[in-house]
Image: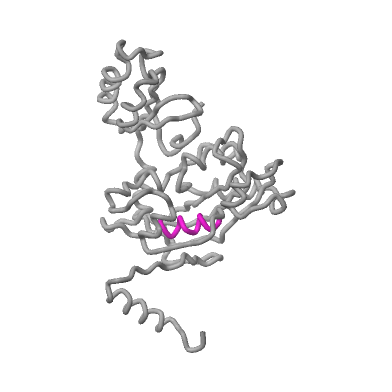
């Protein structure tokens, strides 16, 4: 409105915050062009990524929207520049489920004849030293199925690589985390989620480090992927309490274990899962080394 400028906004914010009865949320509004926030010398390139899909299974479902945005970041986890956003729609070759259409706002007409630019998407992703999604365990299998030439890149995950509970946050959903950090966004399209994720990565936690710094640290760590192959169904609750998750693709309970904790995990499995009294279908777990190049990939 006339006469309403940024100084009025700042004054209103100070008054509301001083009152103590209000909590303010600011809309995520990143520039839709290339922009720098500081010196980029010595910085590395990262990519934030999000997908919209026809369903939850990367084997039978397809990507209908892919959004990417490159950024430059320092070793301390500070984002110093953003590239322009990129987004593509793709026709899945069948009608959208009404639930997906309602969640995304996309229609069959929106997708008809549309296609991801494979070359551009692969070039962008391959230029980055790190790919970040808010649920990489979901997004990575879909992306590597659709763009196999982009397989094997280094991935990290803002949902799993941050101890959100220890940082004082409830839940791990992107929208809810942003809300607790003082931000909001309304749409549920891939491009909007990418900008929301970038805003979250820039946020400084109570330890003085950015969310991105934790995401980077997660990408740097190595570990072991322990698959409780052949575990009896009755041990599912024991495995879940231990931190194992169910991988429907391989039909196994699995978890990642730190490099120096493998012997401890083997012994726990020997006593709690592979003891003859628990009727396992195998005699030992399957164990593989894991790092940012293999973490969050779909396992057969």
Write down the region rendered in magenta. 191-200
Q: Where's residue 204, x and y in %?
A: 33, 59
Q: How many marks?
A: 0
Q: Is residue 282 visible?
A: yes
Location of residue 291 with respect to 216 vertically, above or below? above
Side of 271 where 11 appears, left or right: right
Query: Picture quarter containing residue 283?
Result: top left
Residue at 46% from the left image edge and 44% from the top image edge: 135
Drawn side of residue 17 relative to residue 5, left or right = left
Find out whether residue 193 is within the magenta segment. yes
From the top left corner, tell me how far across and down residue 110 is, in percent: 69, 54
Q: Is residue 194 left or right of residue 288?
A: right
Does 19 appear in magenta? no
Q: Position of residue 47 (x, y in %)?
A: 50, 51
Residue at position x 34%, y 56% in the image = 210
Residue under the point 43% across and 67% down:
37
Q: Indicate whether 275 appears above or below 217.
A: above
Farthest residue toward the right? 113
Q: Residue 161 versus residue 164: which sits nearer the camera?
A: 164
Question: In the visual, does 114 lie left or right of 83?
Answer: right
Q: Is residue 241 above or below residue 170?
A: above
Report the predominant secondary structure element of the magenta stretch.
helix
Q: Residue at x 54, y 59 (%)?
A: 187
Between 44 and 184, the residue placed more toward the observer is 184
Query: Which colour scheme appears in the figure?
Result: one colour
Quick check: can you spot residue 41? no
Residue furthest out toward the bottom? 3
Name the residue nearer the viewer: 121 or 21. Answer: 21
x and y percentages locating residue 291 in the rendered image: 40, 36
């Amino acid at each position: 409105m006339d006469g309403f400028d940024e100084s009025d906004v700042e004054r209103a914010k100070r008054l509301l915050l001083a009152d103590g009865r209000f909590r303010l949320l600011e809309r995520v509004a990143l520039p839709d062009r290339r922009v720098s926030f500081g010196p980029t010398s010595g910085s590395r390139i990262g990519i934030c990524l999000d997908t919209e899909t026809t369903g939850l299974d990367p084997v039978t479902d397809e990507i209908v929207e892919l959004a990417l945005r490159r950024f430059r970041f320092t070793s301390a986890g500070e984002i110093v520049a953003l590239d322009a956003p990129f987004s593509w729609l793709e026709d899945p070759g069948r009608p959208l489920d009404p639930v997906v259409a309602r969640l995304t706002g996309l229609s069959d007409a929106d997708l008809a004849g549309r296609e991801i630019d494979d070359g551009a998407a692969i070039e962008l992703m391959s230029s980055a030293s790190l790919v970040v999604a808010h649920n990489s365990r979901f997004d990575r299998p879909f992306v590597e199925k659709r763009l196999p030439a982009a397989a094997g890149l280094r991935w990290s995950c803002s949902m799993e690589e941050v101890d959100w509970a220890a940082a004082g946050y409830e839940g791990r959903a992107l929208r809810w985390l942003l809300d607790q950090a003082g931000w909001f966004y309304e749409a549920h399209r891939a491009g909007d989620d990418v900008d929301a994720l970038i805003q979250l990565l820039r946020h400084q936690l109570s330890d003085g480090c950015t969310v991105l710094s934790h995401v980077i640290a997660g990408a740097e760590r190595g570990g072991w992927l322990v698959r409780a192959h052949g575990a009896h169904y009755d041990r599912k609750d024991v495995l879940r309490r231990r931190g194992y998750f169910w991988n429907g693709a391989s039909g196994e309970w699995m978890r990642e274990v730190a490099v120096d904790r493998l012997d401890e995990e083997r012994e726990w499995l020997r006593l709690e899962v592979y003891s003859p009294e628990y009727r396992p279908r195998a005699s030992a777990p399957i164990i593989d080394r894991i790092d940012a190049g293999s973490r969050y990939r779909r396992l057969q």
